[in-house]
Amino acid sequence: MRQFRYMRRSGHVGHHVGYGRLSGSAVVAAAIVMGATGGPAVAGGDSSTPVACGARALTTAVAAASAGETLSLSRDCTYRLTAPYAMGDGLPAVDLKLTIRGNGATIVRAGNPTAAFRIFHVVSGGNLRLEDLTVRGGSAAGDGGGVLVDGGGKLTLSGVDVLHNTATNNGGGVAVSANATAVVRRGWLGFGNAAYGGALYSRGTLSVQGAELSRNHARTAGGALYLGAGDAFFYTSVLRRNTSAGRGGGVTDSGSAALEFSDSKIANNTAAGDEGGGIQNLSSLRLERTEVSGNVVGGTAGVGGGVYNSTAGAVLVLRDSQVLSNSANGDGTSRAGGVYNDGGRVTLDHSKVRDNASRVAPGGVYTTNAFTVLDSTVSRNTPTNCAGSPVIVAGCRD
């Protein structure tokens, strides 16, 4: 199994900013954004619009932006938003194609007693790209504490950290509505808090590559991720040290959602309730070259320390993957530290379920129906591998 190591980016990538080639009216507008009183500064053909270090300058620039424009923030500046631009939104809603190049800057809600508002809102027709930026401290009365993407909108995060954001409903960090799209490349979604999906909530189309989702909390389900509908794909990403007061310490895959992890790791997440320390799957889940390890379900009747797979429509496929060292440790009838399946379809393809533990047998795999097993093993689980399960997985020995 490949070794995983993820870390926050150690530096910022940016560009020297200037007015570049602008029309006369654009120069005037850019000068207002910069707060400049003299002539434009030219910076080697960079056609982005520079934004001075200040919340007013940022708000003005976003409100005045043209379709296809790039705003270039002041390097390492902290833009402190002290009041909402409109009800619930810290900045003007984005309804066109816009790129914001952060250059290591931070956009932050100034904190209590500042009124609650999210940072960004992408509405239908909007296409927002954020680069090399930190989005911090948003607080939404609804969905998307950091960023909300409405249906018909698109969001791209490239090297962006989304930290310490909260939502009363869905998506502490980012919420993606039905018929919306979000793409995450690199960056860290951390310390988010919501009822569903501490870091991410999606009912649209979601693609995540090379990102870390850690130390987020869900008050109901999906400590890091709650997928309510649509499709989501995670590649070379890690979800770790997330918690849920209910189900799905790391992930909840619900509704008609299709979720796939490839070359990723879901580790050390905890659900205080009864279903899925690492993953609660009620829909379609595929794990490819992915490790589910060190997760805990802690409820008194907790099941599925690693993976909980339930309902007749639930489909779970593990290919070249491992479910290891997970536990169901709640007082009472906690069982299936590895995989718990009640009525779903499960395929183990060149995969391993080992070193998992529970208070009540079996510690490895509990299932109400047969698995499809292809060159896979269930071994070294406590107190048993499969004994105590209504159906014994093919090839499993105690």
Image (tube, rainbow, N blue to C red):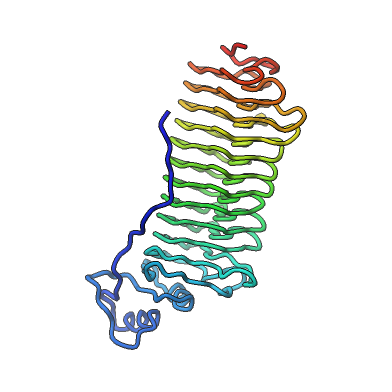
Q: Is residue 105 above or below residue 230?
A: below
Name the residue furthest bottom: 37
Residue under the point 47% across and 21% down? 350
| Residue at (48% x, 67% y) in the render | 107
Residue at the image position 58 percent from the left and 73 percent from the top: 84
Residue 332 percent coordinates (x, y): 77, 29
Report if residue 226 is visible in the image.
Answer: no
How many numbered discs? 0
Which residue does the image show at 30% across and 65% down from the upper left? 15
Q: Quadrant of the C terminus?
A: top right
Q: Is residue 23 left or right of residue 195?
A: left
Work out whether 316 lies above or below 76. above
Residue 253, placed above or below residue 111: above
Residue 181 lies left or right of residue 257; in this view the side is: left
Among all residues in the image, which is located at the extreme left? 44
| Residue 375 appears in the rendering | yes
Task: Say above or below: 156 vs 6.
Answer: below
Q: Position of residue 385 (x, y in %)?
A: 62, 17
Q: Position of residue 333 (x, y in %)?
A: 75, 27
Figure quadrant of the N terminus: top left
Q: Quadrant of residue 354?
A: top right
Q: Position of residue 205 (x, y in %)?
A: 50, 48
Of residue 294 and residue 135, the one placed in the foreground of this image is 294
